Image (spheres, grey):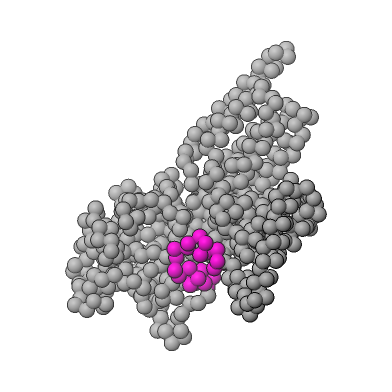
Amino acid sequence: MPAGLDRFLLQSTMASCWFLLSFLFHSLYAHNDFFTSIGQMTDLLYTEKDLVNSLKDYIKQEENRLEQVKEWADKLDSLTNTATQDPEGFLGHPVNAFKLMKRLNHEWADLESLVLKDTTNGFISNLTVQRQYFPTDEDQTGAAKALLRLQDTYQLSANTISNGDLPGVVHKSRMTVADCFELGKIAYSDADYYHTELWMAQALSQLDEGEESTIDKVTVMDYLSYAIYQQGELERALELTKRLLKLDPNHQRANGNLKYFEFQLEKQRKAEAEKKEQEDKKREKKVLDKRDAQRKRSKDPLPERKKYEMLCRGEGIKLTPRRQSRLFCRYFDNNRNPRLLLAPVKQEDEWDRPRIVRYHDIISDSEIKTVKEMAKPRLRRATISNPITGVLETAPYRISKSAWLSGYEHSTIETINQRIEDVTGLEMDTAEELQVANYGVGGQYEPHFDFGRKDEPDAFKELGTGNRIATWLFYMSDVSAGGATVFPDVGAAVWPKKGTAVFWYNLFASGEGDYSTRHAACPVLVGNKWVSNKWIHERGQEFRRPCTMSELE
């Protein structure tokens, strides 16, 4: 075959491959916030796998010159083969999710530089075009901050996370020095010196153990010493600076810091000599309360954070044995409801005040599959209502994506709505549509109320159905670790169990809000959390749940 024709056929084949790849990319969701939904992130794994395959075709033509690129592709080929066998399980590990964001947002750009010299087969131009569908800096930063959030909530050491030693993990993944350094840098950019120290120290530890990396010790120690200084530990900052200068005596910033730290330390020692006892106590408190100090610097708006995080870890639950003895399981037919007479539901008391009940085997696997299939293409970043402006907006304390499903769209949704009405005895015509939510990396929803408070008189005015009288929450997946629903004010915790639902009233029968129902969705440590909920409103319940004269009854 003539050489020209051979080349023409080769180029035609490559063009066809890229056409198919382009079609695949355009079928993806053309929006950001990938990190807020594990369900949608699975598409990125298939995208990355296809990129690797097309890259391997290109390598066959230039194998000798691009040996370095081939090694990269082989590594990712193995990773994506494993990942795509169980995408949700793989991305349920927060380290895998973070590294996926980092690869597609940052490392593929490095690969682009490797092959930039030869664009004859269109690889670079096509990769450049497709990058508009890749995760953004926001996604990578969001995944990184999720790891930091999980670290705090579940009291995990940087070494534990770096080694991938998380409970319930199937796809274990270890972090490299570069990964740890990236986390430290993201914390540093937020002036979060507490986490900067933890992750720069982990990066340095792995370098000291002999791990090879493009990140050098001098760079890591530069960040680490400054983070330690910012937290008031001058002696440690000075020690690290001296160690840095042994490796790089001409480091300009370190030489300047050395003089400054020595001056400040001498000044501190003179002050300590005058007020030794008082200053010792202050220094001790600084060491013990580093995270509290970081919270004050960042102006953490959540007053009950410690209580919330303890409940997420299964600590601080306030149900005494005496109260526990009053909780029961039963078959429930809601006063002989015709639909429940022959098949009563399994009801379990989860909590007494406020009363929270769980219903077992209340939604089938096939119904869950239908709900997820309908919701997934519509998932969008979950929003909250601004209490001042009333405008819907995203918030860093709600990391998930949600979609709304109506009973008119599918018989399964209509059946589910009817089942909720049968079990609760409440009118569904005035309830909100079924909201389906999928939580992303470290997905959570910090403590909040479902009902509108007195300082939010217009919270649900546009619906015209009154306040949210009750909440029904389906758990549509098991979660390997984390993801509990907790009620900080009363010390209650409810753990996800696939096929079950929990129910509670947000309002007393008088119509007054029950402030003990303030609740939160804990960060998902390992796994993929799917839930759906129904917010039931006051209108239509006048005869189903009559008002009482007592305000708190």
Q: Is residue 127 magenta?
A: no
Which picture quadrant has residue 57? top right
Image position of 156 with respect to 491: above or below? above
Q: On the rendered image, what quadrant is the C terminus found in?
A: bottom left
Q: Which residues are magenta?
A: 292-314
How far from the left and from the top, in percent, is residue 442? Answer: 53, 58
Which picture quadrant has residue 481? bottom right
For residue 172, say whether it is visible: no
Count numbered badges in the picture. 0
How far from the left and from the top, in percent, is residue 400? Answer: 46, 54
Q: On the rendered image, what quadrant is the N terminus found in?
A: top right
Q: Is residue 409 left or right of residue 321?
A: left
Residue at image location 53% in from the left, 75% down from the top:
315
Q: Is residue 375 left or right of residue 187?
A: left
Image position of 420 with respect to 37: above or below? below
How far from the left and from the top, in percent, is residue 482? Answer: 53, 65
Q: Nearer the viewer, residue 323 or 68?
A: 68
Residue found at the far bottom of this picture:
322
Q: Is residue 306 magenta?
A: yes
For residue 137, say whether it is visible: yes
Q: Nearer the viewer, residue 200 or 441?
A: 200
Residue at image location 60% in from the left, 32% down from the top:
127
Q: Is residue 455 left or right of residue 372?
A: left
Image position of 86 with respect to 121: above or below? below
- Is the stretch drawn in magenta largely helix, strand or loop? helix
